[in-house]
């Protein structure tokens, strides 16, 4: 993203690039926020499958289109279109919750953050490694005029293949997961299905009774007021603050990594940034499929949520100090790949990035499970997951903008710690600490799936005669 905005030649100086990258991130989140609740409610009415297929068709188209952008304005428009079709991400959460049961719910719900994290890490790696392929791989792509004129098309095409594969799976293998409430047949239908009683069979009566197929209708949904209980609001607020803090630094990291060490960054090239993000994709698979399900079964969702938050704090505090090591390497010209200082910087960087991905896996997977567990019925899963996704999308509107503004401000002014290049990181660490403190007011009941819990039956007493 940093190099792409630089090629647009819209920023006055490298220190202003974070402003424009924030606008790109915001454009996606704004359109996602405006559409996410509509996707959720629509899936509650017509089913999960058609909504998911529509989203995949749109994502496939805009992924390819983004590679053909040549101006910043066009990039913003395409990113907004991407946000519209990405608004149905909450629908997949509902579908996964409907497929799962108490024996595998934690493992099933862990697959969603797994795909998100692997996609983010591997996608960022592909973007860094394969952007501008004519220059990075002249032997392979040096004669391709298409990639010379559109230097960011190749990674977009590679990413679109994933959407194409998902669309094929959705069309040919994915079945509807929304459980519909059977309705009773009408009196006429019931009478027509019953053969003549007491040996009244006729010549046209079937020898074997035909199974009765009841019509279906959507299950009754709870009202918004009854769903937004104080507990759910409290969990949603902590989720929103956590998402705000995480997104500020997640969106800042590529800018921070590319910024000159003299200004508080790491001074990495696009390939190194992509590599640092791509390596996380290996770690996240083990965390999502092995570590998290074991911890959730043993300790519960709430415990995993708190552990994820506790992993984030040291990562956020320590990451900006790594620029001191990068600045030392820059002044001593020790940037060779076999330099002990250079290797040491990468060991520290990957250790911190491992803490980052661990906190993301534990926190986001747990919050997804908590929101799902608090839904009073399966018919309300679309609304609950949509509301959670809405809160996260709103935070993703403001987090990149505030992060970019604060980062540019902090590196332009010679202020003391913590108002220097550490400011965004320290602010995020403070917010995560507040969320961790608030998490201790959440009850243990969020560890259980409420939709499958037996509901109390209240019967009215018959009046005395």
Image (cartoon, rainbow, N blue to C red):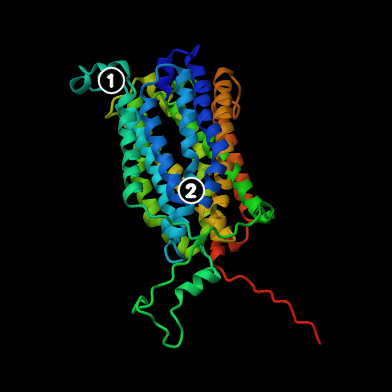
Snapshot quadrant of residue 120: top left
- Tell me residue 65's x, y (percent): 38, 26
Task: Judge left or right: residue 367 versus residue 224.
Answer: left
Task: Judge left or right: residue 88 versus residue 280.
Answer: right
- Tell me residue 291's x, y (percent): 40, 56
How many dots with numbers? 2
Residue with the mark numbered 1 = 147
Residue with the mark numbered 2 = 91
The relative height of residue 355 versus residue 289 in the rendered view (above or below) is above
Describe the element under mark 1 as helix, strand or loop. helix
Q: Residue furthest right?
A: 465
Q: Residue at x 55, y 56 (%)?
A: 370
The relative height of residue 402 versus residue 302 in the rendered view (above or below) is above
Looking at the figure, which quarter contains the C terminus?
bottom right
Q: Residues within 10 Å of mark 2 (few under 14, many from 20)?
A: many
The relative height of residue 332 versus residue 99 in the rendered view (above or below) is above
Q: Residues within 10 Å of mark 1 (few under 14, many from 20)?
A: many
How far apart marks 1 and 2 lie (CA) works out to: 36 Å
Snapshot quadrant of residue 420: top right
Looking at the figure, which quarter contains the N terminus?
top left
Visible residue check, residue 307: no
* Comparing labels 1 and 2, the label whose residue is closer to the camera: 2
Q: Which disc is residue 349 wearing?
A: none
Describe the element under mark 2 as helix, strand or loop. helix
Visible residue check, residue 278: yes
């Amino acid at each position: 993203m940093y190099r792409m905005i630089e090629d647009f030649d819209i920023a006055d100086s490298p220190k202003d690039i974070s402003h424009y990258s924030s606008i790109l991130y915001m454009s996606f989140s704004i359109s996602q926020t405006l559409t996410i609740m509509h996707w959720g409610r629509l899936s509650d009415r017509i089913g999960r499958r058609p909504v998911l297929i529509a989203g995949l068709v749109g994502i496939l188209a805009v992924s390819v289109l983004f590679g053909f952008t040549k101006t910043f304005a066009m990039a913003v428009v395409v990113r907004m279109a991407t946000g519209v079709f990405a608004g149905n991400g909450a629908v997949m959460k509902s579908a996964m919750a409907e497929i799962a049961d108490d024996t595998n719910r934690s493992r099933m719900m862990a697959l969603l953050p797994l795909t998100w994290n692997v996609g983010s890490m591997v996608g960022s790696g592909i973007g860094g490694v394969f952007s501008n392929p004519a220059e990075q791989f002249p032997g392979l792509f040096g004669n391709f005029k298409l990639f010379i004129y559109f230097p960011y098309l190749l990674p977009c095409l590679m990413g679109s293949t994933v959407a194409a594969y998902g669309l094929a799976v959705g069309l040919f293998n994915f079945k509807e997961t929304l459980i519909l409430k059977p309705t009773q047949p009408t009196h006429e239908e019931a009478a027509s299905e019953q053969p003549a009683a007491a040996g009244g069979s006729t010549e046209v009566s079937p020898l074997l009774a035909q199974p009765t197929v009841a019509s279906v209708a959507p299950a009754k949904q709870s009202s918004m007021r009854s769903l937004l209980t104080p507990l759910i609001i409290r969990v949603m607020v902590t989720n929103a603050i956590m998402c705000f803090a995480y997104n500020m630094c997640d969106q800042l990291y590529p800018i921070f990594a590319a910024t000159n060490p003299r200004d508080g960054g790491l001074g990495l090239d696009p390939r190194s940034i992509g590599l640092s993000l791509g390596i996380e994709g290996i770690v996240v698979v083990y965390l999502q499929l092995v570590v998290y399900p074991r911890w959730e079964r043993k300790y519960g969702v709430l415990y995993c949520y708190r552990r994820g938050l506790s992993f984030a704090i040291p990562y956020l505090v320590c990451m900006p100090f790594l620029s001191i090591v990068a600045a030392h390497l820059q002044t001593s010209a020790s940037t060779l790949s076999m330099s002990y200082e250079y290797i040491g910087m990468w060991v520290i960087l990957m250790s911190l990035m491992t803490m980052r991905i661990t906190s993301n896996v534990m926190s986001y997977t747990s919050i997804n499970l908590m929101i799902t567990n608090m839904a009073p019925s399966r018919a309300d899963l679309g609304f609950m997951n949509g509301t959670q996704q809405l809160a996260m999308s709103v935070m993703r509107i403001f987090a990149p903008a505030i992060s970019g503004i604060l980062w540019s401000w902090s590196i332009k002014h010679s202020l003391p710690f913590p108002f220097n290049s550490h400011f965004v990181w320290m602010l995020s660490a403070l917010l995560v600490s507040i969320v961790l403190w608030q998490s201790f007011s959440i009850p243990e009941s969020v560890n259980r799936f409420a939709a499958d819990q037996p509901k109390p039956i209240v019967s009215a007493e018959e009046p005395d005669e």
